[in-house]
């Protein structure tokens, strides 16, 4: 399915019945990373798995900005008259969720932030150097995006009172302290660290988080 939101066409897949739950993928991916867990979540929610602009089957543009992509999702919610939604964002999708929560908190009931970062400085040194080298070789604007954005301060999130679950992998591409600082700065957040997992190993084509998401949202 496709819908016009914020001037672009966003592709999405809708399934299930119940309260609206939006799934937002990471950099260079599309909504299909959630196919496995969506099959379970649709038993309890109306699931909207969205392709961000410049990803999947959504429109390609010259605008590579987390702020713009977050606004896309806000417009998506409004265009479909979803009211308050639950959000699950992975990596870049988590950044979009957090920015949306900062700017349009009235649209969100609860949110889960998987593998989120506030700044490029949150990357481990090894991960940052990999990104930098890959961008130098490919000039892919999606890699430049991660090298330059987001630029969120901890003070920027202190008024986000939305119930939030921050999820980190023990062996994430971001420094462990960055997750701890975010969970402490958000007034109504809890932190969950997944042992023996990497940045995407617990969510891409997996349903490991299903019981945790049910516990949090229901």
Image: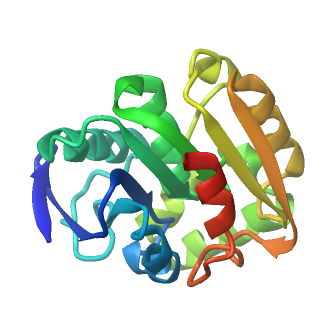
Closer to us: 211 or 167 = 211
- For the point 72% across and 69% down, which residue is it? 199
Closer to us: 47 or 181 = 47
Closer to us: 71 or 129 = 71
- For the point 55% across and 28% down, which residue is it? 162
| Residue 2 place in picture, x, y as percent | 12, 66
Q: How many marks?
A: 0
Residue 158 to residue 122: above or below: above
- For the point 44% across and 46% down, which residue is it? 86
| Residue 130 place in picture, x, y as percent | 72, 72
The quadrant where residue 204 appears: bottom right
| Residue 54 place in picture, x, y as percent | 30, 65
Residue 48 to residue 200: above or below: above
Direction from residue 75 to residue 211 in the image, left or right? right
- Which color scheme does this rendered protein use? rainbow
Image quarter hosting the N terminus: bottom left
The quadrant where residue 10 appears: bottom left
| Residue 154 place in picture, x, y as percent | 69, 24
- For the point 58% across and 58% down, which residue is it? 91
Direction from residue 174 to residue 95 in the image, left or right? left
Closer to us: 122 or 107 = 107
Q: Can residue 149 be seen by looking at this rendering?
A: no
Direction from residue 53 to residue 199 in the image, left or right? right
Q: Can residue 90 be seen by looking at this rendering?
A: yes
The quadrant where residue 4 appears: bottom left
């Amino acid at each position: 399915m496709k819908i016009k939101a914020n001037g672009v066409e966003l592709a999405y897949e809708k399934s299930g019945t119940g309260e609206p739950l939006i799934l937002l993928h990471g950099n260079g991916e599309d909504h299909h990373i959630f196919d496995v867990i969506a099959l379970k979540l649709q038993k309890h929610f109306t699931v909207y798995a969205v392709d961000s602009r410049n990803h999947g089957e959504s429109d390609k543009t010259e605008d590579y900005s987390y702020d713009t992509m977050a606004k896309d999702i806000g417009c998506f919610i409004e265009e479909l008259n979803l009211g308050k939604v639950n959000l699950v964002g992975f990596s870049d999708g988590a950044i979009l969720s957090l920015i949306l929560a900062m700017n349009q908190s009235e649209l969100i009931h609860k949110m889960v932030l998987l593998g989120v970062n506030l700044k490029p400085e949150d990357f481990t040194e090894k991960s940052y150097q990999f990104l930098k080298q890959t961008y130098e070789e490919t000039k892919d604007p999606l890699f430049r995006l991660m090298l330059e954005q987001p630029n969120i301060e901890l003070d920027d999130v202190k008024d986000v009172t939305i119930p939030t679950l921050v999820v980190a992998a023990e062996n994430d591409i971001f420094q462990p302290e960055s997750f701890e600082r975010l969970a402490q700065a958000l007034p109504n957040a809890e932190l969950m660290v997944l042992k023996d997992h990497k940045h995407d190993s617990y969510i891409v084509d997996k349903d490991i988080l299903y019981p945790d998401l049910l516990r949090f949202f229901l």
